[in-house]
Image: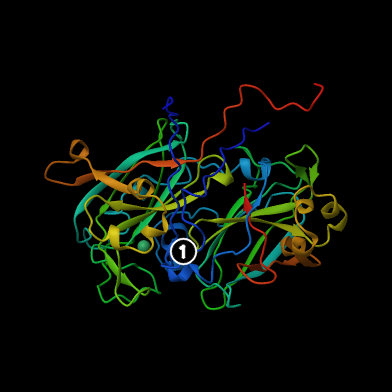
């Protein structure tokens, strides 16, 4: 026997279930309870930067759209700074509820600048995603990179950890200021998820 | 430089794929997760303040009431949000949601025959105080049947969502009630591999916090990932 470490264990995760919207986006469940819901706008109207729209779908292993998920986004501002307590019109965090009938999600934000990576190099611009749903036992973390940032993507330290065949699963297709980002939970083009 | 988090113990959490919970079969990633050193992208996270929420938000007995109080056992749910180093997590957002006393959710996808309660919305939120404490007033949720096996019932439970200070600490879990015989039969509870992990999600009745002639109290602490202590920094060779 040796001495005991006195760390606590992290509380085990449990699925958010099919009714996660009641708790985290109640107006989507048609419950009018809060004066202001949190995470409705990732950026305010005054935030600096290029306005973009991101659209996509989440697919399960049968190729069916997942219609009961909830997604959270976290991102840097146009200068590549993550928000502190005071930020002019920039929250950097948001909640996205895919359509209950189609599973299609869409949100507006500004394109983030390049941020510092873990090794001090510059990371390509990206959005951090966290997704929960019925059948997902612990929230899944991934990132969305931008298809029109080819040069930055090539030298991104995280993308470079991923075998080339799977790297594209994290890169949204660009069409002007619109981006398409589909997430696949299983299959040949399963999205890369992180343990951070 | 922002402190890194302790490695998440993936053997303590449910695996992505747990066949007894059928919904996980087509929604569990098959590929191993890519391990990433922490960076600002996930070691920072959103913060919330008192202007974001109202005082009544944490009172599920009153925050949706239209004509009177909701039906059911009045309870107080309270506890602390801590990290793995046993330090309190102050000023962090705690959100809960739950079924009503009959086991019915106010959600278009819930078709259980137990009735909707006109005075119960089923969600609440609050910020922890300086010592990481939170408190909700609500009614005890009922158990409910669901489609998994032909005869599956969820134990009475409250869903909890907690933030911490880093996006990588983000956690959703569920709170169960001490003494509920359905806990041992639930395929979602049993996705947790270790009995001690299951016990960690069971709230204990707390007579000292009970309001006499009013509401029974249950105590439930949530532990988020802790920051690694780094008395000596990693330095590249030669420095
Ligand atoms: Fe539930």
Q: Quadrant of residue B113?
A: bottom left
- Across and down, in percent, residue A150 comes to 86, 58
Residue, far front: A1
* Residue depicted at x 26% and y 64%: B143
Q: Which residue is mark 1?
A: B18
How many C-alpha atoms fall within 10 Å of the one at disc 1: few (<14), some, or many (≥20)? many
- Across and down, in percent, residue A196 comes to 62, 46
| Rendered-image quarter of ligand 1 | bottom left
Q: Is residue B165 visible?
A: yes
Q: Is residue B171 above or below residue A163?
A: above
Quadrant where the N terminus of chain B sits is top right
Q: Chain of mark 1?
A: B
**In front: B53, or B84?**
B84
Q: Secondary structure at mark 1?
A: loop
**In front: A32, or B230?**
B230
- Across and down, in percent, residue A27 comes to 45, 64
**In front: B186, or B210?**
B186
**In front: A4, or A124?**
A4
* Residue depicted at x 46% and y 57%: A24
Q: How is the image coloured?
A: rainbow
Quadrant where the C terminus of chain B sits is top right
């Amino acid at each position: 026997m040796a001495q005991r470490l006195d760390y606590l264990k992290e509380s085990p995760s449990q699925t958010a279930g099919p009714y996660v919207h009641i708790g985290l986006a109640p107006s989507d469940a048609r419950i009018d309870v809060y004066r202001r819901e949190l995470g409705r706008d990732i950026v305010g109207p005054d935030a600096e930067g290029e306005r973009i729209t991101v659209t996509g779908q989440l697919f399960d292993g049968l190729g069916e759209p997942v219609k009961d998920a909830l997604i959270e986004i976290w991102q840097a501002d146009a200068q590549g700074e993550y928000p502190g307590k005071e930020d002019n019109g920039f929250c950097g965090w948001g909640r996205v509820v895919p359509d209950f009938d189609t599973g299609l999600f869409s949100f507006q934000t500004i394109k983030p600048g390049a941020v510092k990576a873990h090794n001090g190099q510059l990371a390509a611009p990206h959005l951090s995603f966290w997704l929960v749903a019925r059948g997902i036992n612990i929230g899944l973390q991934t990132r969305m990179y931008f298809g029109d940032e080819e040069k930055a993507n090539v030298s991104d330290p995280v993308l470079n950890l991923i075998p080339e065949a799977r790297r594209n699963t994290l890169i949204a297709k660009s069409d002007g200021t619109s981006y398409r980002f589909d997430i696949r939970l299983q299959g040949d083009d399963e999205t890369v998820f992180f343990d951070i | 430089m922002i402190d890194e988090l302790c490695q998440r113990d993936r053997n303590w959490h449910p695996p992505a794929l747990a066949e007894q919970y059928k919904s996980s079969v087509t929604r569990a990633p098959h590929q191993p997760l890519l391990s990433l050193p922490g960076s600002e992208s996930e070691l920072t996270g959103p913060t919330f303040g008192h202007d974001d929420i109202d005082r009544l938000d944490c009172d599920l007995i009153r925050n949706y009431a239209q004509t009177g109080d909701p039906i059911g056992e009045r309870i107080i749910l309270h506890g602390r949000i801590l990290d793995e180093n046993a330090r309190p997590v102050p000023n962090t957002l705690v959100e809960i949601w739950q079924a009503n006393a009959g086991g019915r959710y106010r959600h278009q996808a819930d078709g259980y025959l137990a009735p909707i309660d006109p005075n119960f919305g089923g969600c609440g939120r609050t910020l922890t105080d300086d010592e990481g404490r939170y408190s909700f007033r609500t009614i005890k949720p009922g158990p409910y049947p669901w489609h998994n096996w032909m005869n599956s019932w969820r134990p009475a439970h409250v869903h909890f969502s907690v933030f911490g200070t880093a996006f990588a600490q983000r956690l959703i879990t569920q709170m169960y009630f001490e003494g509920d015989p359905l806990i041992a039969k639930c395929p979602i509870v049993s996705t947790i591999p270790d009995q001690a992990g299951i016990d960690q999600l069971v709230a204990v009745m707390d007579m000292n916090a009970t309001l006499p002639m009013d509401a029974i109290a249950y105590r439930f602490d949530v532990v988020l990932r802790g920051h690694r202590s780094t008395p000596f920094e990693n330095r590249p060779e030669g420095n």
